[in-house]
Image: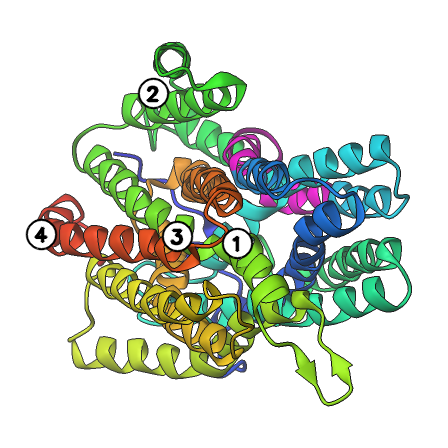
Amino acid sequence: MSTLIDVAATTIDRPPMLDDRRLFGHPRGLGLLFAVEMWERFSFYGMRALLILYLVNYLHWGVANAARLYGTYTSLVYLTPLIGGYIADRFIGTRRSLVIGGVIIALGHFSLSLQSMPTFYLGLALIIIGTGFFKPNVSTMVGQIYLPGDERRDAGFTIFYMGINLGAALAPLVCGSLAQELGWHYGFAAAGVGMILGLITYLWGVNRYLPGIGAVARRDRNYRAAVAGDISMEEYKAPVLPAVVGAILGVLLAMLLHGGWMGGFFGLTVGAMLGMTLGGTHGEERKRVVAICIVIVFVIFFWMAAEQTGSSMSLFADKHTRRQLGHLTLPASFFQSINPIFILLLAPMFAWVWTRLGTLGRSPSTALKMTFGLMLLGLGFVVLSFGARYADTGMKVSPWWLVGAYFLQTCGELCISPVGLSYVTKVAPTRFASLLMGAWFLGNAAANWLAGNFAALTETMANNEARFFAIFVATSFGMAILGLMIVPFLKWLTCTVDA
């Protein structure tokens, strides 16, 4: 087992700045990452709020084709972090990776604002690539702030998650208003400005508030440790052969299942990741990798339903919901701010609850928290299914159906997403930390691809919305029941860490 841990996460030569408690009991570096992620998510969710509406209402695409493109784009956005996490771990470190990713993302948004089909596809491609460099590493850096066993970690990730959702709440309001009042290209350009502001914030504060974190790739630190004899040279070397074998098997499986180019890409990356992490670990470390992979499966089913926000639920708000406020008609994109606003309101309460239960020694395991999250998500779709029954009769329904669904979905999300990010940083073997954080987002990739394909069904189920949303009631409650059954097994797999 590797004994090498980041300098920032040990008591040896640990910079004092990482142990200050001036941000509500947390280091101020958490506040910097909060702000950086807020602006990056502003850019992502600002563009996402416009994408399917732009395709359907401006380019006049069919709903099914628009939903499939949306699903493919959002899945690739969460697929490339697996590659970006590996590059950061092995070659450039998390610090450089964030800057590279931020620049590429900004260029992508500005490319979208030019409003031609070549620049539209170029913009999507740039955002996909840039997010791969950015997304896994900012979350990994949050975990590197805290020492192993620090009870503040889950609460810290919940605070960090508020930054994600502050950006997500502001983005549809700002970008949606600009798109409606001035034109689509202004909305897309505003998303690019948000990413530039995030980069400026990061470069201003990284050396001041995050000394030593992410400055050197783990490969270089592990090499020095191998030369010194602290770890074996086998632990330093990347397990290339298992990764290649895994990639080949993954592609072959995708071909057998007729998964197309997207399935092949998934098979390649998932197979390589499993080969590298399972082939490069043994004993307790391998058990922890298995635990992360199992948890990711449950995350896929959560986000497959929750990511209807940007597709079928957005179209439901556009076509079936009363949006008049006096003499104004609210843009459908505004409804995508409801979920992040609820997160901003509820996250402090959840952070306090997790911290308090941890202090009392009664904190539920991450697996149990995720089970609660799936149950709450299922209840949210129960509410939406009832509202959709009225929409199926041809009437415009109250926005409160969507608000109620989003409230329950948000409570479920706070039981899954921030604690899940914390879980990966606690459970992942150190030298695969960013790679396995990328694998966590790989679950989001699969979920978004599935979500887009499910959303495409709304075109053929146009008069049966209630039945469509009931699909996610069944999947959410089904996985919650399964999750309850395997909680003891997950605890056994992670018995050497506090998870």
Image coords of residue 439 (percent x, y):
42, 38
Q: Are marks 3 and 4 in contact (CB under 8 Å)?
A: no
Residue 3 in view of the camera: yes
> CA gap, disc 2 to disc 1?
36 Å
Query: Relative to residue 79, is residue 496 depicted above or below?
Result: below
Other residues around mark 3 within 10 Å, as few (<14) / some (14–19) / many (≥20): many
Cα distance in 3D space between marks 1 and 4: 31 Å
Q: Earlier in the sequence, mark 2 or mark 1?
A: 2
Q: Secondary structure at mark 3?
A: helix
Was residue 82 drawn as part of the magenta stretch in this picture? yes
Q: Amino acid at mark 2?
A: Gly
Residue 143 vertical placement versus 329 (above, below): above
Q: In this figure, which residue is indicated by the disc labeled 2?
A: 275
SS class, disc 1: helix
Label pair 3/1, CB-CB below 8 angstroms: yes
Whole-number angstrom distance, CA of label 3 to CA of label 4: 27 Å
Q: How far is disc 3 from disc 1 in space, using C-alphas?
A: 10 Å
Residue marked by disc 1: 312
Taking the image as shown, residue 175 lies to the left or right of residue 409, namely right
Q: Nearer the viewer, mark 3 or mark 2?
A: 3
Real-space Cα separation, disc 3 to disc 2, in angstroms = 37 Å
**Residue that appears at 36% across and 71% down:** 383
Disc 4 residue type? Met
Magenta-highlighted residues? 79-101
In the picture, the disc for residue 485 is: 4
